[in-house]
Amino acid sequence: MDKTPVDLMIFDLDGTLIESKWDIAQSVNFTLAELGLPERPIEDIFGFVGDGVKRLLRLAVGEGNQAKFDEALKIFRRYYLEHCLDRTGFYPGIEPMLQHFIHKDKAIATNKSIEYTRVILNGLGPQHFRYMVGGDNGFGLKPEPGMLLHIMEKTGASKERTVLVGDSTNDINGGHNAGIRVCAVGYGMGNRAKMEACQPDWFIEKPEQLMEIFL
């Protein structure tokens, strides 16, 4: 199979580069307990991840408790900043893959707040990424294309030589909305059937497969 040449690789964060769902779920349930609200099943919280922390907490506190949302945000922020690296790390295969593409421009485009993103990547390996854009940087949330277009503008990469790697329908649709190709990953938190329905250009089961696809 001929490899596809790329100049810029943009990665989603949660569920694509890092296994972070346990620390997120623990932080959500700590927040709910502090507010005197019932904790949520872990799997439910996993399903809330992907649209940024505000939507995550709105769903977690529930429709009848939105008055507690602002307090929830403060509790979650304080706790998660202290605990976001308790169990979170790169998925197996991520670091050798990033090393393989050491001479490529690489960036993060995540709906996660940039504050959390920086803390996590400073702990795990910020040297790999030229740019990081978070959900609160003012470019909108994926599937809006804003953060992707901003990264391409910053790096000078063409749409034809850019790929987005992600684990959700937000990533696939965001990439399509930005006019770039998308590689979906099957090992993250995304729903496989929903991702396939969005028609990504590639679908991989482990990070090392990126080395077989891209040049």
Image: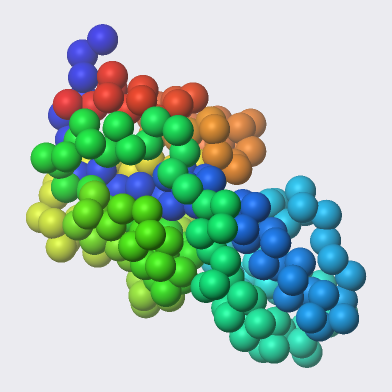
- Percent position of residue 88, x then y: 52, 52
Color style of the picture: rainbow
Residue 96 in sight from this viewpoint: yes
- Percent position of residue 108, x then y: 33, 55
Identify which residue is drawn at 89% across, 70% down. Answer: 38
For the N terminus, the image quarter is top left
Identify which residue is drawn at 24% across, 50% down. Answer: 128
- Percent position of residue 89, x then y: 47, 48
For the C terminus, the image quarter is top left
Residue 159 in sight from this viewpoint: no
The relative height of residue 83 versus residue 174 in the rendered view (above or below) is below
Q: Quadrant of residue 183?
A: top left
Image position of 61 (left or right of 159): right
Identify which residue is drawn at 49% across, 24% down. Answer: 205
Front one among 2 and 176: 2
Image position of 57 (left or right of 147): right
Image position of 212 (left or right of 72): left
